[in-house]
Structures are given as C-alpha cells and as structure tokens.
Image (cartoon, helix red, strand yellow):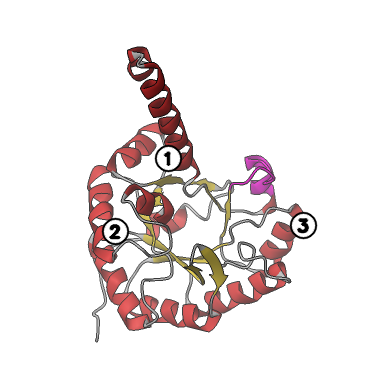
C-alpha cells in the first residue's frame, strides 16, 4: 500500500491556537448539531469525542465503530462549521502504520486539520497501555505524507502506570522526535506533575477536565496549551435525557417533555 502527500488541509491556523498565552478551550462534539452549538457559543475549534460518537451510534468506546461510520459523522460535522475540526482517531484502527496513514488521509481529504492518536487500547472495556514505538512509527508515516496536526495521546495516567509522570515524559519525547505537534496526557492533574512535564517537553500540553484539575487561569500559568472534556458533556446530556424519559413514562405529565 502507498499513499500520496495531501495538500488539501491547512493545519497552520489550528496549530497557532496551541501557541497562545492562554490555553485553547476546545469543544468536544459528537455530531453536526453539537458542533454548530459550539461554534455559536464562540469556541475557536472543535474536536470529536470517539467515546461520545461511538455511544451515540450504539457502540462501546475502543474502535468498535467502523472507520466508515466515523468518516460519515466527521463529514457531517465538517460541513456544519467554519472553525477547525480535529478528530479523535483513537489508536488509528490498525497496527499497520501505512494503513493508519491511509485512513488519516481520508480525514484530511474531508478538511480535518488535526487528529488525536493514542498509545492506549481498550480491551474488554479496560484501557491498556500500548507500544510507544508503534505509535511513534504511525506518527512518522503520517507526517511523511500528510500535513495534519497530530496530538499524541499518552495513556500512562489512565492506565495507572507505576511511574506515570516519568513514562509520560519519555513517551512524549519519543513522539515529539517522530513528528507529533502536541501531547495529550489525560488525568494528569497535580500542579507539580504538570509543571515538571512542561519543563521537559516543549510540545503544547493538552489536559483533560477532572474535579481536581487546577482552574483555567492556573493551567495557563503552568504552561498548559489545550483543555479537553471528552465525552463528559455528552454523558451529562444522556443522563438528563434518561431522567426525563423515566419521569415522563412514570407520570405521563406532558410538561416534563414540553419544558
């Protein structure tokens, strides 16, 4: 298999959003409607949540939905907004770096300017830490042919690695050498850990919202460049929808639906 370089996307604007003094607060979306709402609210960019999209399509997270299903949703999102669109592409849907790059080219051809690519895998509902060298090779192959922002996700904290900070830094440096443009470390939340990471890795750091994460201003002071919330908003909406369904079915009160 071979792929040709793609010149159809321009990640420069998206990359610049990661180089400001304040962190990029990115909106995680799962369909065209949620993307439109995010753009209307004033967000500078949207990024898909693989978890939210998979659940909305009746799948569990962890590459259970097909690439074609994802491409369909991404195409609808891209056509709905003018702001940059990044895609959570999980581990790339293949262990073959060339095949991963071919999939990414399809995203690029749709106008996607960035992807998340992770070193973790989900097996039987459990997240496991994968091979760092494999992700580095995927990054190298993609960057050799496609102009796209790669946000490399490090799953050391999510998998409770015994030396999560040190291993996060090691992997981040490996991915940077391979050509990554940013590093996503979900569940890193202690100020000391964030500070140490930023001191040792020059790529923009993306963190994930948690109850113990420092506030927006403090994260900016620490050098964080991007903040994601994944499927958290989607989960809140689904929980509220469940409550409405249960209440409406139980009471038969139309006002519950009418608002």
Q: Are marks 3 and 2 in contact (CB under 8 Å)?
A: no
Circle 2 crowding by C-alpha within 10 Å: few under 14, some 14–19, many from 20: many
Image coordinates of residue 170 in percent, x first then y, are 65, 76
Work out how far the residue at label 3 is from the one at label 2, CA to CA, in angstroms.
Answer: 37 Å
* Quarter of the figure with residue 8: bottom left
Judge whether residue 251 is colored magenta: no
Q: Quadrant of the C terminus?
A: top left
Q: Residue at x 43, y 70 (%)?
A: 91
Q: Secondary structure at mark 3?
A: helix
Residue 111 in view (yes/no):
no
**Residue extending farthest right:** 192
Image coordinates of residue 160 in percent, x first then y, are 67, 65
Q: Which residue is mark 1?
A: 43
Residue 35 in view (yes/no):
yes
Of marks 2 and 1, the one in the foreground: 2
Mark 1 and mark 3 lie on one chain; the one further toward the N terminus is: 1
Front position in the image: 123 or 158: 123
Q: Which residue is mark 2?
A: 70
Q: Residue 192 got which mark?
A: 3
Task: Say if 236 sits above or below 143 in the image.
Answer: above
Q: Are marks 2 and 1 in contact (CB under 8 Å)?
A: no
Q: Secondary structure at mark 1?
A: loop
What's drawn in magenta, residue-wise? 209-221
């Amino acid at each position: 298999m071979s792929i040709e370089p793609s010149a159809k996307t321009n990640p420069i604007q998206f990359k610049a959003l990661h180089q400001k003094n304040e962190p990029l607060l990115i909106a995680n979306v799962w369909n065209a409607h949620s993307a439109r709402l995010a753009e209307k609210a004033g967000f500078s960019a949207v990024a898909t949540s693989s978890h939210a999209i998979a659940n909305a399509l009746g799948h569990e997270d962890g590459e259970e939905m097909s690439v074609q299903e994802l491409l369909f949703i991404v195409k609808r999102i891209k056509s709905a907004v003018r702001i940059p669109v990044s895609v959570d592409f999980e581990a790339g849907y293949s262990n073959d770096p060339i095949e991963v790059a071919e999939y990414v080219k399809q995203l690029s051809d749709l106008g996607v300017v960035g992807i998340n690519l992770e070193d973790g895998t989900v097996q039987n509902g459990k997240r496991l830490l994968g091979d760092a060298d494999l992700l580095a090779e995927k990054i190298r192959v993609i960057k050799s042919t496609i102009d796209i922002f790669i946000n490399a996700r490090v799953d050391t904290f999510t998998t409770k690695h015994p030396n999560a900070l040190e291993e996060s830094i090691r992997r981040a440096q490996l991915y940077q050498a391979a050509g990554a443009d940013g590093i996503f470390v979900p569940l890193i939340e202690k100020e000391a850990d964030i500070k140490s990471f930023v001191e040792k890795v020059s790529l923009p750091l993306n963190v994930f919202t948690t109850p113990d994460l420092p506030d927006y201003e403090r994260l900016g002071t620490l050098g964080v460049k991007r903040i994601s919330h994944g499927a958290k908003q989607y989960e809140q909406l689904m929980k509220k929808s469940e409550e409405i369904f249960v209440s409406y079915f139980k009471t038969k009160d139309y006002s519950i639906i009418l608002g």
